[in-house]
Image (tube, helix red, strand yellow):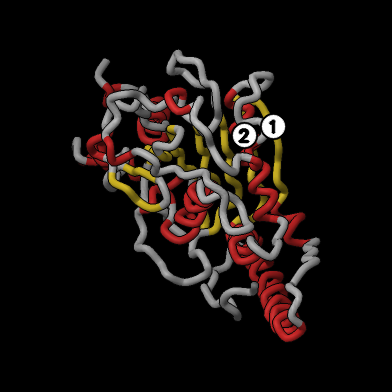
Amino acid sequence: MKLLEFPRELRQEILTLAVCSPVTPPANASEGQRDRIHNYRGIWQLPKQSSTALPLLLVNKQINSEVKHVLKHAPAIYHVDIMYFKDRGLWTTWSIPQLPRTQYIDCVYATFRPFEPEAELEPRYRNSLDFRGGDGGPPVGVWSFYHLLFQLFSSGPGYVGSSREESVGHYVYRKIIVDVQAPTDGVEHKSLIINNRDYQKVHRRLGYFANHDNSAFALEERLVKFMCNFLSILLGLNYHTMNDGAQILENIQESIEFLVNGKPFRVFDIDARATHLDVGYFGVTPALITERERKYKLWKEWLDDRRQRMKDELELEDNRPVGDIM
């Protein structure tokens, strides 16, 4: 039978699978490395990817109409594959059935796959993911992971929207699911953050990564624990992370869930955290403490109202009453 001879209900199921299923990500670094462009802080993305529905929309009028019907009723769920190359960056591959219809996104499902850097990687990738210690805060490399989130908030899935400079992200996500998977490159991974060639060299300020080479844990477990630990720091809203952690509370409705090889690992209940905030430190200078407490109070009242509007899926304005709190 030809496709158009199938019953419409069955054909709709086929078109839904064709349009909404994730695209096949690169199997290794040699696939598509020349096409990637440096975004920021070690993030390497493909040039703007077109809709997975586009080829089918161009087949004929009937298929065009049926694909549009699929897109109209499809949930706002997006997939992204992220290849984690030690000291060579985070490489993203998005699946984008269509552009967001509203600022509300049901879910982003992110797959993280660790890789040992290969010898044939282009020199421009070297040291683009830097894990040296920061100035009292988390190491520089952790902000590469945070920037993946920040771009979701400001530019939307696939970063297809215009870049916004406002302190408040435009897009709101009901949940984000992160599935950290085991390496498939067939090599031994001695460390989470140091490639095998440099493993014997002296590395400074690795206190943040006490278990980076602990062979008692699989590499994917080390990676997911690293991500969870620093997300906890961000959500702790301490002196160094208040302004960044606040954006997570402003743009995620329910949760960030972590999986390991598809199995549940940890859930961050963002809604519960936003309801019971506790900031215990605003500095040491009395004048600064007073000013920061004032800005925090304004922001918290605004956040409570914003999150109620988020639950009702009302249009949100990017009108945070203060800039940086800390």
Q: Quadrant of the C terminus?
A: bottom right
**Among the 4 quarters of the image, the one containing residue 249:** bottom right
Secondary structure state at the residue bearing disc 2: helix
Three-letter code for the amino acid on which mark 2 is drawn = Val
- Binning the other alpha carbons within 10 Å of mark 2 as few (below 14), some (14 to 19) or many (20 upward) gives many
Asked if one can make out residue 65 in the rendered structure from this viewpoint, the answer is no
Question: Do tag 1 and tag 2 residues touch (Cβ < 8 Å)?
Answer: yes
Report the residue at 51% width, 38% height from top.
110
Task: Please tell me whether mark 1 or mark 2 is closer to you in this view.
Answer: 2
Viewer-proximal residue among 89 and 2: 89
In this view of the protein, can residue 277 be seen by the observer? yes
Is 235 left, or right, of 48 in this rendering? right
Which amino acid does the dot numbered 1 rest on?
Phe
- Image x and y of residue 147, in percent: 48, 53
Q: State left or right for residue 53 relative to residue 155.
A: left
Is residue 293 or residue 125 the one in the foreground? 125
Q: Is residue 31 above or below residue 295?
A: above
* Residue 20, quarter of the rendered image: top left
Instruction: Please state if 225 lies on the left or on the right of 98 as rendered.
Output: right
Report how far apart the C-alphas of labels 1 and 2 lie in the structure.
Answer: 8 Å
Residue indicated by mark 2:
224
Task: State the SS at label 1.
Answer: strand
The answer to whether 39 is drawn above or below residue 266 in the figure is below
Q: Nearer the viewer, residue 152 or 73?
A: 152
Residue at image point 59% right, 43% down: 205
Q: Quarter holding the N terminus?
A: top left
Q: Which residue is mark 1?
A: 265
Residue 129: percent from left, percent from top: 44, 42
